[in-house]
């Protein structure tokens, strides 16, 4: 589904990504973790072309992301993405938020799009809030709407960029529950997150990054039982047992 | 001996002054509409990653902001009528002062509007554009549906304030002997030998209109301030 091969990116002399390679198969759930500044968010944003990269290749469902001939809008329409700060459109109601891209990008009819949006809103447990505006919802609720908005596009895979980092601790679980459910339904997912509990529960593989490199890329069992690199051992020692 | 005020010529002058006000408002309205449309395009060019576009917009804005409005109006008064007359094959004595004043104002004010709009666009968090793109929207769709609506909502007070300034600035068209409100007041006052009274009266009208408008802006600002 997603093949990342030898991807490097730099801002001037600063290397953000160094020779990163990995693959994500259909139905797999990958958790990307690592200290801040390690390039994990940048890597995931390269997958749908939100961040350009200088060398290497990323193939998503047979389409090369870095190829200048690729119609990125078309590709992105089917790659869902969820952001740290939700990025709902504050001037639109929740219903409009869910429908707008379906109508404008996929060309669906307005009522068809609203129906689909409301179904997904129900799925994330927020049907009663359809008429509200994003500012009237809590962070956790907004993030669930954002997930529903991405799902409304019928994505072939979902990218999560630290979806719970901006949330109050008590709202983290409602978002993780939705993500867990998605994973169990077989959605292909690539999640940048520090939620190791989530990783242990649903991930197939864990990628650990440090200084722009993929340091570990292993099954979750192997990663949590005995991480090979010293950096990953330190990282785990610090964020677990709290 | 102290100056003796005589206000008696004002009532008779009201119809002429009213016509003048109509001209002032017409110029203001056209300049606002063109200024916002062209200013939005300039702002988008300026923020664009396409170098020639952003250089053009930056040059345009800096040029107009570094030149006095009166001078721009005079240039347009001297050049544009001939240009338009040539373009449309109009007889050389056609009165194009109003058209050239409107064009001059619109182009000048666009530079100021574009700076307000640029700040407005930049006030929308960057993540909004990323979210639009991630949903498959094109740049144009993202701007039209998501970024500009939010930008304009943030900008409304500034745009209205600029409109008030613009309305005051229309008095500068007197350099082209165009009968706007100020020009009419001046002419009538001069004719009746009551220039002082007439200009005081005109000043009072400008003050009342602009003060009322800026109160309205403040009121709107309070009412629609994001919670």
Image (cartoon, rainbow, N blue to C red):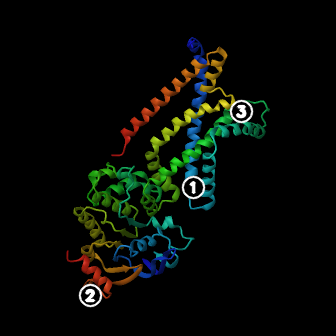
Question: Dividing the picture into quarters, in which one does residue A234 lie?
Answer: bottom left
Query: Can you say whether B214 is above or below A214 in the image?
Result: above
Q: Which mark is residue A226?
A: 2
Query: Can you say whether A117 is above or below B99 in the image?
Result: below
Q: Which mark is residue B46?
A: 1
Spatial separation of the CA atoms under disc 1 and disc 2: 53 Å
Q: Which residue is mark 3?
A: B96
Which is more toward the observer, A148 or A112? Answer: A148
Number of residues whose C-alpha sits closer than 10 Å to that of mark 2, classed few (under 14), some (14–19) or many (20 or more): few
User: In the shown orientation, is residue B16 left or right of residue A108?
Assistant: right
Camera sees residue A113: no
Give the number of the mark in front: 1 or 2: 1
Of mark 3 and mark 1, the one earlier in the sequence is: 1
Q: Residue at x 25, y 78 (%)?
A: A238
Spatial separation of the CA atoms under disc 3 and disc 2: 84 Å
Camera sees residue B45: yes
Q: Position of residue B174 (x, y in %)?
A: 65, 29
Query: Label 3 lies in what chain?
Result: B
Instruction: Classify mark 1: helix, strand or loop.
Output: helix
Question: Dividing the picture into quarters, in which one does residue B13 lie?
Answer: top right
Query: Label 1 lies in what chain?
Result: B
Number of residues whose C-alpha sits closer than 10 Å to that of mark 1, classed few (under 14), some (14–19) or many (20 or more): many
Q: Residue at x 69, y 37 (%)?
A: B74
Query: Can you say whether B123 is above or below A225 in the image?
Result: above
Q: Position of residue A127 (x, y in %)?
A: 28, 54
Query: Label 2 lies in what chain?
Result: A
Instruction: Classify mark 2: helix, strand or loop.
Output: loop
Number of residues whose C-alpha sits closer than 10 Å to that of mark 3, classed few (under 14), some (14–19) or many (20 or more): some
Q: Position of residue A227 (x, y in %)?
A: 29, 86
Q: Are marks 3 and 2 in contact (CB under 8 Å)?
A: no
Quarter placement of the N terminus of chain B: top right
């Amino acid at each position: 589904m997603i093949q990342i091969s030898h991807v490097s990116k730099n801002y001037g002399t600063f290397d953000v990504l160094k020779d990163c390679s990995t693959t994500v198969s259909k139905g797999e759930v990958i958790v990307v973790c690592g200290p801040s500044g390690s390039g994990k968010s940048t890597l995931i944003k390269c997958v749908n072309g939100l961040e350009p990269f200088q060398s290497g290749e990323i193939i998503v469902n047979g389409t090369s992301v870095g190829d200048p001939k690729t119609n990125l809008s078309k590709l992105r329409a089917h790659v869902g993405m969820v952001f740290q700060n939700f990025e709902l459109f504050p001037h639109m109601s929740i219903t409009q938020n869910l429908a707008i891209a379906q109508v404008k990008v996929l060309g669906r009819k307005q009522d068809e799009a609203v129906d689909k949006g409301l179904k997904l809103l129900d799925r994330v447990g927020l049907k009663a809030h359809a008429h509200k505006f994003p500012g009237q919802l809590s962070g956790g609720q907004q993030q669930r709407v954002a997930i529903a908005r991405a799902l409304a596009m019928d994505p072939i895979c979902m990218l999560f960029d630290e979806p719970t980092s901006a949330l109050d601790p008590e709202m983290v679980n409602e978002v993780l529950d939705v993500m867990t459910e998605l994973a169990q339904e077989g959605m292909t997912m690539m999640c940048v997150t520090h939620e190791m509990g989530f990783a242990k529960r649903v991930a197939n593989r864990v990628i650990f990054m440090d200084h722009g490199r993929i340091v570990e890329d292993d099954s979750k069992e192997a990663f949590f039982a005995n991480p090979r690199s010293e950096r990953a051992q330190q990282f785990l020692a610090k964020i677990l047992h709290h | 001996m102290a100056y003796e005020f005589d206000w008696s010529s004002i009532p008779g002058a009201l119809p002429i002054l009213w016509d003048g006000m109509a001209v002032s408002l017409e110029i203001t309205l056209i300049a606002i509409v063109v200024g916002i449309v062209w200013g939005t395009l300039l702002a988008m060019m300026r923020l664009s990653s396409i170098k020639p576009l952003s250089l053009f917009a930056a040059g345009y804005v800096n040029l107009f902001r570094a030149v006095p409005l009166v001078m721009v109006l005079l240039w347009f008064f001297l050049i544009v009528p001939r240009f338009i007359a040539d373009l449309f094959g109009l007889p050389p004595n056609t009165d194009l002062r109003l058209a050239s004043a409107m064009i001059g104002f619109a182009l000048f004010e666009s530079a100021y509007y574009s700076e307000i709009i640029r700040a407005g666009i930049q006030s929308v968090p960057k993540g909004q554009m990323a979210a639009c793109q991630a949903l498959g929207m094109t740049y144009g769709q993202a701007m039209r549906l998501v970024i500009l609506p939010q930008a304009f909502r943030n900008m409304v007070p500034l745009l209205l304030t600029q409109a008030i300034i613009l309305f005051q600035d229309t008095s500068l068209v007197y350099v082209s002997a165009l009968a706007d409100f100020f020009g009419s007041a001046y002419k009538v006052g001069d004719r009746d030998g009551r220039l002082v009274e007439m200009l005081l009266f005109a000043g009072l009208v400008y003050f009342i209109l602009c003060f009322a408008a800026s109160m309205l802006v403040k009121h709107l600002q309070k009412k629609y301030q994001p919670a």
